[in-house]
Image (cartoon, rainbow, N blue to C red):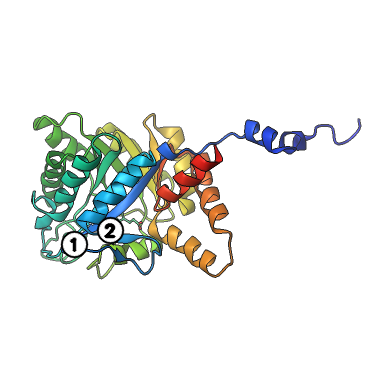
Amino acid sequence: MSFPEYRPRRLRRTPAVRRLARETHLVPSQLVLPMFVREGITEPSPIGSMPGVVQHSMDSLRRAVAEAAEQRIGGVMLFGVPEVRDAVGSGADDPNGILNRATEAVVAEVGDALVVQTDLCLDEFTDHGHCGVLQPDGAVDNDATLERYTAMGLAQARAGSAMLGLSGMMDGQVGAVRDALDAEGFTDTLILAYSAKYAGAFYGPFREAVDSQLKGDRRSYQLDPGNGREGVREALLDVEEGADVVMVKPALPYLDVLADVKASVDVPVWAYQVSGEYAMVEAAAAHGWIDRRGAILESLLGIRRAGADAILTYWALEAARWLRAEL
Ligand code: PBG
């Protein structure tokens, strides 16, 4: 026998062969842009730890979603930053709360051209920064929080949100919100379950982005970073409760969980490339230590390869422009 017996390099010889042999593709419709809208500002306000990302004013948000629709990305995920907070997050289900007003404005601007999604969690609206309401001893009260989530979900559906992003990691949240939506006739409102959301260090810049009031951490409700099978179990539970899409978050440190979840469920699986993942690449690129565009596209492709059908990423617009130019 003569060696090499088989020559895998044949499939890598020219750009045309490589293009034809590529297993995984990334297209703009698979990208969802997370956006922040802040109450009481008239100009967009930069977020120091996320260069290139801003807290939008109502006006700049409208312009930015119009551009997102032009780029034909998959959707936008809206986060609200209120002026006033309280213990139960009253701004979350107030129809005049910043997130609900922004949702109405965005839907009026883009209609069905984008899937308009909203973060369904109390942390931006509570004065203690936790994702739920607290018991007298300071612990997060799961079942009392579910009542707040159903009120928030209904307010978001009334504001026109097409898809509710349940990111609070309370037990039973998907079933509770699904039941409430159905009972009020919102049977077409989609539920995106942040099923395997891990407690960890990669949300740091996001805390600045939403002006988070959190002291402490979220370890009593978000998953322990050591647990992969538990992430799969959470996804299976959410599908059972009626989730239309399940998600793994963060993305890059949890690609194994993403692949396992993808193999275990028959609904779409998404991943969230979070603020810390964004900041790492931006910081390295700013120092000239990494090829920015190459690192961004490679990270997105890797997340797709591991199993994500779509990806929430702060680079959605820029990546969509690059991808379109490559076609
Ligand atoms: C909760 C929420 C968080 C993020 C998205 N939804 C914060 C948290 O769980 O601490 C983080 C996203 C990111 O880091 O980019 N409302």
Q: From the image, which quarter does the C terminus lie in?
A: top right
Q: Which mark is residue 220?
A: 2
Q: At label 1, which amino acid type do we have?
A: Ala
Residue on which disc 1 sits: 139
Q: In the drawing, does residue 266 fall left or right of residue 129?
A: right
Residue 211, percent from left and from top: 25, 66
Out of 60 and 38, give the one closest to the viewer.
60
- Disc 2: residue Cβ within 8 A of ligand 1's nearest atom: no
Query: From where the camera sits, is residue 183 visible?
Result: yes
Q: CA distance from mark 2 to mark 1?
A: 8 Å
Determine the residue positioned at 22% across, 55% down: 59
Residue 24, percent from left and from top: 55, 36
Query: From where the camera sits, is residue 169 visible?
Result: no
Answer with the quarter of the image where residue 165 lies: top left
In what element is the residue under mark 1? loop
Out of 317 and 50, give the one closest to the viewer.
317
Q: In the drawing, does residue 110 fall left or right of residue 292?
A: left
Residue 297, percent from left and from top: 53, 49
**Do tag 2 and tag 1 residues touch (Cβ < 8 Å)?**
yes
Residue lying furthest right: 2
Q: At label 2, which amino acid type do we have?
A: Ser
